[in-house]
Amino acid sequence: MRDKRLGIEWKQVVGGASDEVWSQVRWESDGEKGRAMLVVMSLEEVINSEGGVKEKGRGLMEEVVESFMLGEKEGWEWVVEQVDRLRSKMGDIGSVVVGQVLVDDEGKRGMYIGGWGGMKVVLVRGGERMEVWGGGEAVSGWLLEEDEVVIGSEEFVNGIWSEGASEVEMVAKMGEMEDGAKVAGLVVKVKKIKLTEEVVDNEQEGIIELVEPEISGIEPSKAQVMVVNEEPGWKRDLARLKRKLGLGGRGITLRSEESGKRRWAMVLGSVFLVIFLVSVVVGAGRRSVMKEREEFEGVSEPIEYALEEAVRLKSVNAVRSRSLVIEAKEEIVSQGDRFVEGRLSEEWAELAKRVDEVWWEVSGEVRIEGEMWLDAGVFKEGLKMEGVDVRDEWLYLWGEDERVVVRVSLNDKSGEVVAGGESLSGVVDIAGADEEILALNGSGVIVVSEEGEETARLDMEGVEGRLVEGYGINAYVVAGDDLFRFPGTGEGYGKRRRFLSPGVVVDMSGVMDMAIDGEVWLLVSNGEVVRLNQGLVVDYELKPVEEWQKPEKIMVSEERGRVWVWDREMGAVVEFDRESGDYLQKLVWEGFGRAGGVDFDEERGRLMVVIEGEVWVVGI
């Protein structure tokens, strides 16, 4: 057969195929010298393809045949015939070694390339061109992930490089350059592929086994590439088969040519029957395994891509980076039942671990440690506190069961019990306000002076209050479905007034906490925040990167431009930008999960955390 385009004669085409690799070798003879030319489909193009090697291999070979202008009959059909012939005779044919691909024994450094002959090899790493060998010397190099290797004649290498190795779509090329030079070679793209054992068969000369992926639970089959420069005769094939079956040599005498032929026919028929049955069973098993892997990588590859993008974007677009990992975490949870057991369970566990690692890298989660600051037992033995409120230079601690309020100096830790007894019966919330204590017991607000004396009662007028907060000389109360303000007069408080402007309605049913810094901030149980300015609702939204579990406290600093939300069940305080609502970081400490209350000390830049009878501080 002749190639009309190159004007050369092809003496032999042999190749091999597996579910991982399709390979094909042509042997060119131009009368004076021979050159083996390889067409190798890269692994990532075949793995997980719907049609497997049958569709991908056929498509590749059709492209090759078309590029050589071969007719349908003598082209594709002839290639198929030769490939099928080879697959039934994977013996030690040929004696020409084109190159070899080895794997590091320890599996740490990557894929090893080396070889002999006149082929030129160029390694492309990170866009840089590095010559590995050329000119007939046996040299080597280590391939890493994302490397590209170009192997071929000088003209082929130069042609590929001029096109840009990273942009080459086909993994191999044969033909001629514009100047008429004959070219041949291949391009191997190294992806995230686990390599297994050494793949050169030393007992069978002329066989080059290509790299293969490690597939959990099965022994991967090997794709072999062989080249020969002459058609082996049937006698040579028969003699080789006899040696393999132990039927030739001393001790065996054939009675006659006819009996020998019949015997050989029986032997060959038995051998081919066994091979056929084994291939059917193994093929069915491999199809099942490959289908499972296809499904697995259909899920895992998008997750891996999302993780790579998240790492790339973490300093460019932190919000998008974190959302990508959150989507990956959700996919891990939703698909976990499919892969948590079986052949791919270990790979699935590794992927889940990788998701967690990337989350820690991009999420802004910071593990912190608290420091014990005060034991409230110095004021009353066995005192256990349930709430905390920071006001100017004072820290107010209180406990409903204890029916006591303790005021502590943030400067020197000196303190005293300033309120207690029956006056605090039924109190649901306490706040400091302009050197006074506001104690909300539902039906009204009890105002207690620094000396611990009750100075006033603010009537809620039949509406049950849930939250109280002081700001300046005013008192604010969330009651029923509304928000009220008791204006300070300097000598006391005026009657309650509705804080919301006319026509403004806010659902107060789920409000958990309130903070005031000139504007009023309401924290809802689902983590949403209602921001109010002069009685009007401001368009505002916090942008957390994960779902809230039980947000209980909101803290705001106009000076620092921050909003903090304490979530007890999450065991964290999450920090946001005050103006944009963008997520900034998540402060994680086991004490946050045990705390009775948390508040922010503006002047000293720290969180005051009450855990039973102790006060802890956490710097932020």
Image (spheres, rainbow, N blue to C red):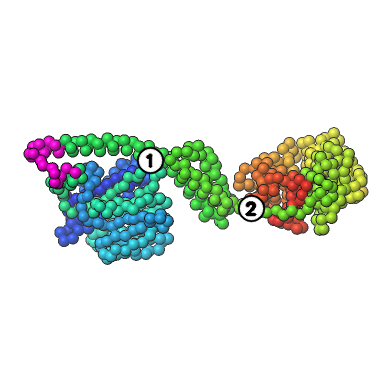
Give the crowd class for mark 1: few <14, some 14-19, many >=20 residues within 10 Å: many
Q: Position of residue 597 (x, y in %)?
A: 75, 46
Which is more toward the observer, 470 or 63?
470
Which residue is painted at 26% across and 59% down in the image? 183
**Residue receiving disc 1:** 290
Which residue is painted at 67% across and 48% down in the image? 590
Give the crowd class for mark 2: few <14, some 14-19, many >=20 residues within 10 Å: few
Q: Is residue 166 left or right of residue 477?
A: left
N-term-proximal mark, 1 vs 2: 1
Q: Which mark is residue 455?
A: none
Asked whether residue 30 is drawn in magenta, I would say no
Residue stretch in magenta: 246-265
Q: Position of residue 207 (x, y in %)?
A: 26, 52
Q: Secondary structure at mark 2?
A: strand
Q: Is residue 82 left or right of residue 122?
A: left
Q: Position of residue 529 (x, y in %)?
A: 70, 44
Asked whether residue 251 is drawn in magenta, I would say yes
Q: Secondary structure at mark 1?
A: helix
The kind of residue on which mark 2 rests is Arg
**Residue receiving disc 2:** 367
Which is more toward the observer, 323 or 427?
427
Q: Position of residue 147 (x, y in %)?
A: 39, 57
Which quadrant of the figure contains the C terminus? bottom right
> What separation in Å lies between label 1 and label 2 (alpha carbons)?
42 Å
The kind of residue on which mark 1 rests is Met
Which residue is painted at 70% across and 41% down in the image? 524
Q: Contact (CB < 8 A) between labels 1 and 2?
A: no
Which residue is painted at 81% across and 43% down in the image? 399
Which is more toward the observer, 468 or 405?
405
